[in-house]
Image (cartoon, helix red, strand yellow):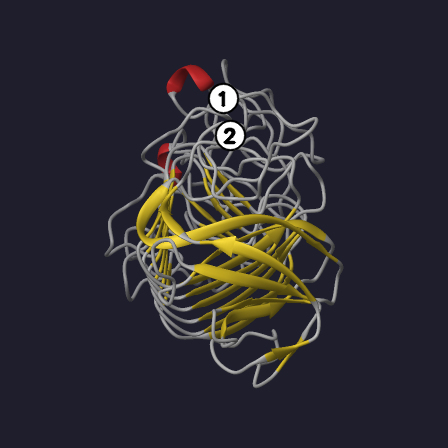
Amino acid sequence: MHLLGASIEASAGDDAFHAETKLTVDGGTVNVTSCYEGYEAKKIYVNGGNTHIVASDDGVNASVADLSDDADADTVSSMLPNGGTPGAPGQGDGAATSDAGGQAPAGARQGGQAPDSAAQQDGRAPGAAGVQQGGQAPDAAGAQQGGSAPEPPAGDNAGGAGGATDPRQQGGDPAAGGGVGQADNSCLIQINGGYVVVDSVGDAIDSNGNVEVTGGVLLVSGPTSDGDGAFDYDGSATVSGGTVLMVGSTGMAQSFTGGTQAFAMASASGEAGQSVCVVDGSGNVVTSFTATKRFGMVLTSSSAFAEGGEYTLVIGGEVANANADSYTDSGAVSGGSETAITASCTASAGVGGAGGMDAGGANGAGGIGGAGGPAAGGGK
């Protein structure tokens, strides 16, 4: 899937934008007002554009591709999404698709009648003979018959690749390297540019493999549940450019594992509607935005950060010259409560597993620790 410059407003009962192998955002305006997951693919590249996502689960999710059905595995760039070639929509072999009697010819979808080919319908995987109509499960002959679901093939289930039955577990079979808690290095979220704002009930930025931030602006209001995190990855997470400001719960919190740009993570709590602002030693705003729900941690990075530099988190202040998300990288803030932070390009040793925060609120190597926190090495 390639988003080049359209203006799209979407409300989805499931994923708003889903590709199995690769999803690239190069421009345009995308406003997802509700969905289960916002952007989902094995590899997700955000190079530009303006994205806002409100998700009931993950905001941006890199998960193992499900290519178990050959009819869904078309990766030839000259093919249309329905299997046809340019100039011949609706028919894979380029033949005419209309019918004088209004009936559907083989391979075409006309008037809601089931075609007799193995073409994919409605963007979902076909059944035994390859046909799915209206989102209903086909019977053994491939046509819809009362909506009864066929028995899945041996070794498969509703979880997709690897057989994960929990819809939040996108990694598949842990033995295959794609399970929860075990990295699949083929999965990647890479943010190189653009402006991305995520409000999620589940993990906001979630990769079954790695995360790379090289540019752009990433603002996140993550979950309130300690079973999810604003930032969740199973491999590594690096930052070498751009602006990052994330808030969320503390139970599964992760920081960056490293990078060439300094970052900081801290325990700092606030409520929905409060501004979150990072200020340098001269009182100048480095970055800011408004949280959409209560939070207990903050993760931030900016090209303005210096290695070992000391900065101040200001929660609940009034930020001047901010946009509708209360984002700005200049100006000043007045009022609010303050927490001191120190930026570094390296995650320091702390309580928990790779990528989180120690009890003192500094960059750490795992989940947020402190009294009652996870034991060393057990953060994620």
Dot 2 alpha-carbon crowd within 10 angstroms: few under 14, some 14 to 19, many 20 or more: many
**Residue at (57%, 36%) from the top-left corner?**
143
Indicate the position of residue 37 as horizontal and vertical percent values: 58, 49
Residue 221 seen anywhere in this rendered image of the structure: yes
The quadrant holding residue 250 is: top right
The quadrant holding residue 78 is: bottom left
Against 203, residue 96 (above or below) is below
Report the number of discs: 2
Indicate the position of residue 316 as horizontal and vertical percent values: 71, 68
Q: Is residue 15 left or right of residue 6?
A: right
Of 87 and 322, the residue lying toward us: 322
Q: Is residue 249 left or right of residue 70?
A: right
Q: Is residue 167 left or right of residue 106?
A: right
Quick check: marks 1 and 2 in contact, CB under 8 Å?
Answer: no
SS at mark 1 in the image: loop
Against 187, residue 198 (above or below) is below
Question: What mark, if any, has residue 99 been given in the picture?
Answer: none
**Residue at (37%, 30%) from the top-left corner?**
184
Of 113 and 166, the residue lying toward us: 166
Dot 1 alpha-carbon crowd within 10 angstroms: few under 14, some 14 to 19, many 20 or more: some
Kind of residue at badge 1: Gly
Residue occupied by mark 2: 160
Quadrant of the rendering where the N terminus is positioned: bottom left
Q: Earlier in the sequence, mark 1 or mark 2?
A: 2
Q: CA distance from mark 1 to mark 2?
A: 30 Å
Residue 103 seen anywhere in this rendered image of the structure: no
Residue occupied by mark 1: 377
Of 332 and 218, the residue lying toward us: 332
